[in-house]
Image: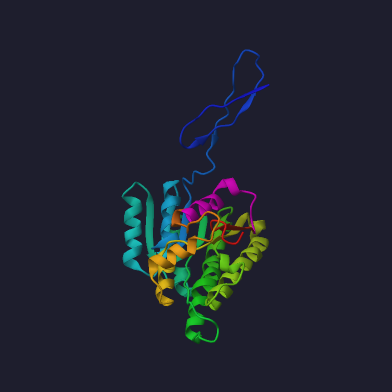
Amino acid sequence: MRLKMKRLGQDETFRAVPDVSGVGGSLVVRSKNPLVLEGKVAVITGGASGIGRATAGVLAEYGAQSVILDIDEDKGKGAVSAITEVGGKAKFIKCDVTSSHECREAVDKIKAKFGRIDILFNNAGVIVRKDVVSHEEAEWDLVMNVTLKGTYLMSKYVIPAMAANGGGSIINTGSGWGLKGGDNAASYCAAKAGVVNLTRAMAIDHGRQNIRVNCVCPGDTDTPMLRGEARQLGLDEDKFLESSGVDRPLQRIGVPRDIANAVLFLASDLSGWITGATIVVDGGGIA
């Protein structure tokens, strides 16, 4: 029995089916490409820069309507322009994810404009490079509120919209330091560990609504936040980034697209039976 395959259109994939004709014929069954996100609305928090911006672009590249939420209006609108200039669909809404009112209002605006939310990427986060003794209480609260509370608030208001539409996919940004400890980053490690386990709890609670919830845990990635860490520690940015990659099996740090590709997978139908999972994208850093 032979298998034959034929390439189809961009929005379609192919399936190989047995050639049982005995005369070399083949049957091609057309099916939708599971990576195509046409008709889906994706919300990305912290989408004005770094991993969030890259992910908004990748999801739009694959057909989604990206909605970028961020407190930085100028960078957010710049991200939208970069996406729309190459034919993607994107919108910016200013939103502080630590504010219940602003999260609810942003979700209401998205529902009014697009009528649905299919994908939520809870990505907003901050880091303070200090141990617990050095931390000011306000710094601790900032990291927890943006990283962990923000994930809770956005999920709180998005999940009912997803459920009303038959389901969806939520992806939370954790960290390698949410799975193991790191030096001089006590609040960040605690917040990201919370995100990792919140992901599991949400997957259990909302699977019955056909909502999948997964976590992507990046390693060091060349973003404004990582470069900001170097400044907090009083280190040269370039040397800090170089040293962050040398001990990894793949011998480099990540770029935002590395993480965005993992989010694309978790947002797409290719991951349709994956929920409550944590995917580490770190070049083997915690292997």
Region rendered in magenta: 258-276
Instruction: For the C terminus, give its image quadrant.
Output: bottom right
Residue at 45% x, 51% y: name it. Answer: 59
In front: 286, or 79? Answer: 286
Q: Is residue 2 above or below residue 120?
A: above
- Which residue lies at the image location 53% right of the left edge and 74% below the top edge? 188
- Image coordinates for residue 177, horizontal then vertical, percent: 57, 68
Q: How is the image coloured?
A: rainbow
On screen, residue 31 above or below 192: above
For the stretch drawn in magenta, what is the main secondary structure? helix
Q: Is residue 64 left or right of residue 201?
A: left
Residue 6 part of the magenta-drawn span:
no
**Residue sitting at x 32%, y 60%:** 78
In the image, is residue 272 part of the stretch drawn in magenta?
yes
Counting from the top left corner in percent of width and height, residue 131 is at 53, 81
Report the front residue among 112 and 40: 40
Q: Residue furthest top?
A: 23
Q: Is residue 155 visible?
A: yes
Q: Is residue 94 visible?
A: no
Displayed quadrant of residue 233: bottom left
Q: Position of residue 132 (x, y in %)?
A: 55, 83
Using the image, determine if residue 187 lies above or below residue 163.
below
Task: Tell me how many marks there are.
Answer: 0
Q: Quadrant of the N terminus?
A: top right
Q: Position of residue 26 (x, y in %)?
A: 59, 20
